Image (cartoon, helix red, strand yellow):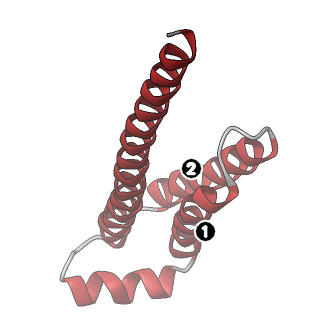
Amino acid sequence: MEGLLNFLTGLSILLIVLVLVSVRRAHIRAEYSVSWLGAALTLLLFSRAHGLLNRIAAVLDIPSPPMALVLLVGCLFLLVLFRLSVIISALRDANIALAQRLAILEYYVAHAEGKNKG
């Protein structure tokens, strides 16, 4: 049990460091890093708070508290990935609209240049 909790603690610290380094190097925007930092800090909190983890495992009727933590972390990361999927979908839609507007502008410019030559 303690080995899995130590591994998850190390994983959360590694994730925090990776996110902070990525923000510093501008590989990830600050508003997107908040979700990852929140998830990593939650993982760190639950992996170190044994009493809280035991209560959560009892409420979820899971015999092993570390397995309850793995389940919670999996759900948390699913929520983060869902949020990022929504953001990516909105950006894709905005990108399509921008490409369409650019095509219309290019058409009008080419049409105006044709009138000036004629």
Q: Secondary structure at mark 1?
A: helix
Q: Position of residue 51 (x, y in %)?
A: 48, 87
Q: Please identify the residue farthest to the right as the structure is shown.
A: 24
17 or 104: nearer the viewer: 104
Q: Secondary structure at mark 2?
A: helix
Q: Which residue is mark 1?
A: 41
17 or 114: nearer the viewer: 114
Write down the quadrant of residue 60 in the picture.
bottom left
Residue at x 59% of width, y 67% of height: 44
Residue at x 49% of width, y 19% of height: 115
Near mark 1 (Cα within 10 A), the count class, few <14, some 14-19 or many ≥20, is some
Q: Amino acid at mark 2?
A: Leu
Q: Position of residue 92 (x, y in %)?
A: 38, 43
In the rendered view, tell whether residue 19 sits above or below residue 107.
Answer: below
User: In which quadrant of the rendered image does the N terminus lie?
Assistant: bottom left
Q: Earlier in the sequence, mark 1 or mark 2?
A: 2
The circle on residue 11 is: 2
Q: Residue 28 vs residue 6: left or right?
A: right
Q: Please identify the residue farthest to the left as the structure is shown.
A: 61
Q: Residue 87 vs residue 27: left or right?
A: left
Q: Position of residue 70 (x, y in %)?
A: 35, 61
Residue at x 63% of width, y 62% of height: 31
Q: Amino acid at mark 1?
A: Leu
